[in-house]
Structure formats: C-alpha cells, structure tokens
Amino acid sequence: MTDPRPAGRRRMKLAARCRVATEAPAFGLVVFCVILLNAALMGVETYSGLAAEYQRLLRTPEQCCLALFSLEMLLRIGAFADRPKAFFRDPWNLFDLAVVASAFVPFVRENTTLLRLLRLARVLRTARFLPHLRILLIAVGRSLPGTASFLFVGGLVLYVYAMVGWVCFAESDPGHYGSVGRAMLTLFLLTTLDGLTDAVRAGLQISRLSILYYASYALLASFVLVNVLIGVVLNSLDEAREIEDAADRDRKQPGPPPAAGPDTDVRDRIATARRALDEIEASLPAQDGRPPRRLEPSHSSS
C-alpha cells in the first residue's frame, strides 16, 4: 500500500523553504530597495526630456523591478503552500498580489495613466517593511468610521453657524455672508483661526454682539471638535498597536508539530487499548478468593 501523503509532505517542505527565504532580513531589505528604486524611476519619468532621451535605459530597470516583484510574490505564495487559505486572510498579501498582478492585465498595460497609478501604489508596499508606518495605515483605516461621524457633526455645526451668519451679516458683509455657501466657506477658513482677528474687527463694526458669535464658533469648531478628532485618531492608534502586537505574537508562535506516520499511529492505538484493558481487569472483583484472571489476547486461526 502506497503512502497517501507524499503530496502533503512536498507542500510542507516547499512552504518551509519559502518561509525561510521570505522571513530572512536580507529578503526584506532587497524588496524594500527595489520599491525605492521603482519610486525613483517614476520620478525620473516625470521629466519629459530625460524620459524621451533615456526611454530604453529607463525601461530595462522597470522590467527588472517587475520581475523581482513577481518573484517575491511567488515566494510569498509558496510560503503558504501548506495552508493556502491563510494567504488570503492577510490584507497585505491581497494588496501586494493585486498591485503586482495588475501589471500583467492586458487592459491595464494598455492604459498608461492607470498603469502609472498602480505603479505608484507599489510605493505603499513599503508599509510591509516599516512597522510604524504599517501601524499608522491601520490606524487611519480604523479611524474612518469615527472620522465620518466627526465630519457629520462638524458639517452640522458649520451649517448652523453659516445660517446665523447669513441672517446677521448678509446685508453688511455680502462678500463673506451673502449666501449660505459663502458663509460656510468663510467659517471653514476660520476653523484654522487664520484671519479670525480681521473677522472679529469687521464684526464689531456691525454689532458688539458679534464677539459672542465668533468666540463661540472658535471654541466649538477649533477646539472642541478638533480635540474630538484627535481623540478618535489616538484611540485608533492604540487599537492598531494591539492588532500589530497580536499579529507579531501569532507569527512568532512555533508551527504545528510534524504529523506522525501511520506506524506510529497504530502503535499509539494499541498501547491505549492495552491500558484500557488493564484498568478494566483491575476493577473486576476477585472470585473464589482467587485474583482476577488477566485477559490474554486471542489469536485467530489462520
């Protein structure tokens, strides 16, 4: 009878070899340098004179970068040969695969603008090799729901104050408060406190009560809401650090023990059955003052 697991063992050996290669510090350093080289080539291509004069010279390193990125993705996929589903659970793996594979899609290769944007996305892959940048990107993603709520509340405050400003200052200052749109634009610029002094002076010429309008808006929009946004971002940073620490612990955990062969499995079952029989025999009461008889394994006649 042949061994039913040769393919599984080959996948485990392939995954182990690829994992050793991808987890090596030199591998990450090389890929990081290739990403920076690709970014530098994109910057050089923005100079029309250099791009036209050295078009062939610039095309060769670009093809080399694409080949190295493809080799990197093959090694990363090979590192998950024993557990393919785990590769697709990692968002960074999906992002890297989409960015690299897009260069081979016919429609994308023909569209120069789209291809340049996707090449620009390769620069974001540096987050894989920079833990702090990776934490920041995770924090930005996790802060989006809180940021959306902040934008809604901020827009509501801005609209209310714009309507009040239009009612109070539309006739005296139509350039800034002539409509609700102009008023919202004026107040949005005042959120940074830039030009607030001039706005307060102009408002005092209209009414002394305008100081309450501008003071309350500055406190609410420039201090309270901005601090709320900072709190949302800091909370997301803490969550991102916890996620990254948990991922590091999972990566550092030793892999599962090697699977036992069929012979070892049979021996373990026989030993377990023998221990169970001994326990049953010891629990039986003695009969006629004689010790309990030990059960002997029966041999079937051939």
Image (tube, rainbow, N blue to C red):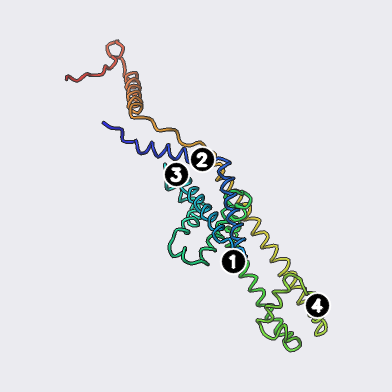
The residue depicted at 67 percent of the width and 59 percent of the height is: 231
Which tag, 2 or 4, sits closer to the chain's start? 2
Q: CA distance from mark 4 to mark 1?
A: 31 Å
User: Residue 277 at x, y = what percent?
Assistant: 32, 22
Q: Which residue type carries mark 2?
A: Ala
Q: Is residue 239 visible?
A: no
Q: On screen, 214 above or below 233? A: below
Viewer-side residue, 127 vs 254: 127
In the image, taking residue 36 as reference, residue 8 lies left or right, namely left
Q: CA distance from mark 2 to mark 4?
A: 63 Å
Q: CA distance from mark 2 to mark 3?
A: 10 Å
Q: Which residue type carries mark 4?
A: Asp
Q: Are marks 4 and 1 in contact (CB under 8 Å)?
A: no
Q: Which residue type carries mark 3?
A: Gly
Query: In this figure, which residue is indicated by the disc labeled 2?
Result: 21
Q: Quadrant of the C terminus?
A: top left
Q: On screen, 160 above or below 2? A: below
Q: Nearer the viewer, mark 4 or mark 1?
A: 4
Query: In this figure, which residue is indicated by the disc labeled 1?
Result: 148
Q: On screen, 46 above or below 167? A: above
Q: Residue furthest left?
A: 302
In the image, taking residue 97 as reference, residue 3 lies left or right, namely left
Q: Nearer the viewer, mark 1 or mark 2?
A: 2
Q: Which numbered tag is attached to residue 198?
A: 4
User: Residue 78 at x, y = what percent?
Assistant: 44, 44
Q: Which residue type carries mark 1?
A: Ala
The residue depicted at 42 percent of the width and 38 percent of the height is: 12
Which tag, 3 or 1, sits closer to the chain's start? 3
Within the image, what quadrant is residue 271 found in?
Answer: top left
Query: In this figure, which residue is indicated by the disc labeled 3?
Result: 78
